[in-house]
Structure formats: C-alpha cells, structure tokens
Amino acid sequence: MIRRRKIKASRANREGAAVVEFALCLPLIVLVVLGTIEAGSLLFLKQTLVQAAYEGAKVAIASGDTEQVEAVIDAVAASRNITDVTVAYTPSDIASVPSGEPITITITAPGDANSLIPFGPFQNQIVQTSASMIRE
C-alpha cells in the first residue's frame, strides 16, 4: 500500500515538472516559429523583386517604354501580393539608350508593408534588387 502511494506521488511530480517545462519552452518555440515565418516572407519578397526586375529588364531592352516596363513589374508584384514597389532606371531615359548599351532596372520595396507579421526583426528594412541587360 505504501509503495503504491509513492508511485502515484512520483508520477504526479513528473507531470507537474513537464507542465512547468512546457510553460517555459512555449514562448521560445513560438518565437522561433514566428521568426522562421518572417524570414521566409523576406526571402519571398526578395525573390519576387528579382523576378520583377528580370521581367522588367526584358521589356526595357526590347521596347524602351517605361510604361510597359512598369506594367510588367506591377503585374509580377501584384500576382504575389507585393505592395509599395518603386522602380528606378539606369540610365534614366531608357528610350534613348543605343543598341549594345546596358539598361539596369532597380526595384525596391519596404519590408514593413510586405511582412506577414506586423512586428519583427525585419521591420524598417528596404529590400532592393536590380537586373541589367544589353539593349537589342
């Protein structure tokens, strides 16, 4: 009889310890999961901007029309729910670039507006990428 009471008391102590350990570890687990989600979101944003810059540069070397370039970039960004995208051209007048010269499209987007989590380590970050191609 005494032995059974000791086993039950021992089991209750272990269950209590497991609950305390879980309560201590849960915030850390949640922090790691949210950090992973936010890092994945930032990588997705960067890759989207790379794709948009590439597609914009393809249009720029063929047509030299900034409206067409921005329409393509906006379409890529919109298809992936990216907002507040800004586009810069080097040289600034791509229509006057002669054949054989490079055109560079630079795209930036804020991390704040494109984050899944309204707080986090990547707030106030500006993601920028560019693509260069030779004018046809």
Image (cartoon, grey):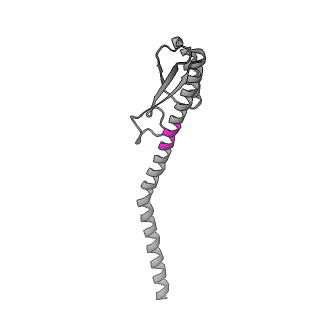
Image point (55%, 22%), residue name: 134
Q: Where is residue 14 in the image (x, y as percent from the top left)?
A: 45, 73
Q: Where is residue 122 in the image (x, y as percent from the top left)?
A: 42, 39
Magenta stretch: give its range. 39-44
Q: Nearer the viewer, residue 114 or 131?
A: 131
Q: Position of residue 103 (x, y in %)?
A: 51, 20
- The reply to whether residue 85 is visible in this rendering is no
- The reply to whether residue 51 is visible in this rendering is yes
Where does the C terminus fall, quadrant-wise? top right
Residue 16, above or below 65: below
Residue 109, above or below 5: above
In the image, is residue 40 part of the stretch drawn in magenta? Answer: yes
- Taking the view exactly as shown, the residue that stands out farthest to the top is 96
Magenta span: predominant SS is helix
Q: Nearer the viewer, residue 108 or 111?
A: 108
Image point (54%, 35%), residue name: 47
Q: Position of residue 119 (x, y in %)?
A: 41, 40
